[in-house]
Image (cartoon, rainbow, N blue to C red):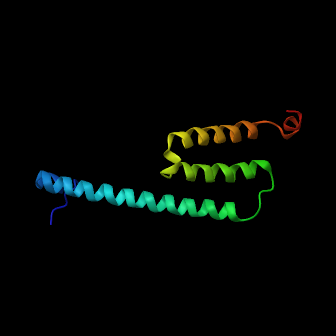
């Protein structure tokens, strides 16, 4: 047994097809891990949003923004007419959440 500090790069000893298959498997595993992390993050987000009623307009806006974003990812949400409405609604939520609540009564 030699004590070689440099690891052997096995990919260079295999054919191109085998290297490509290995790369595809690695990317697939990474994508699946990313999907699982996203699912877990969404579950945590939805749990937080379901924890109770919104206490402020900002919290209600966050819930609405989340639901609108979920809808935007559906086939119906990708319809050009719906995309315009989604963009408008998200813009309204953003604009109104930036104004102090005292100014909302004046407008």
Residue nearer the viewer, 52 or 16? 52
Task: Kindly identify the residue that appears in the image at 70 percent across and 42 percent down.
Answer: 93
Q: State whether residue 52 is above or below residue 5.
A: below
Q: Position of residue 4 (x, y in %)?
A: 19, 57
| Residue 9 visible here | no
In which quarter of the view is residue 43 placed?
A: bottom right
Q: State whether residue 80 is above or below residue 73.
A: above
Q: State whether residue 75 is above or below residue 50.
A: above
Residue nearer the viewer, 56 or 15? 56
Residue nearer the viewer, 91 or 32? 91
Q: State whether residue 13 is above or below residue 104.
A: below
Q: Position of residue 50 (x, y in %)?
A: 69, 64
Q: Quadrant of the C terminus?
A: top right
Q: Where is residue 69 in the image (x, y as percent from the top left)?
A: 58, 49
In which quarter of the view is residue 46 placed?
A: bottom right
Residue nearer the viewer, 78 or 60? 78
Q: In which quarter of the image is the N terminus?
A: bottom left
Task: Kindly identify the residue that appears in the image at 43 percent across and 57 percent down.
Answer: 34
Task: Kindly identify the residue that appears in the image at 61 percent across and 49 percent down.
Answer: 68
């Amino acid at each position: 047994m030699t004590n070689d500090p440099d690891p052997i790069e096995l990919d260079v000893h295999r054919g191109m097809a085998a290297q490509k298959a290995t790369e595809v498997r690695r990317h697939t595993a990474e994508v699946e891990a990313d999907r699982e992390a996203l699912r877990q993050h969404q579950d945590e987000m939805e749990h937080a949003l379901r924890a109770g009623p919104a206490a402020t307009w900002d919290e209600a806006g966050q819930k609405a923004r989340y639901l609108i974003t979920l809808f935007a990812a559906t086939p119906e949400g990708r319809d050009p007419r719906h995309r315009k409405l989604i963009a408008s609604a998200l813009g309204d939520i953003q604009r109104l959440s930036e104004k102090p609540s005292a100014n909302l009564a004046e407008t």
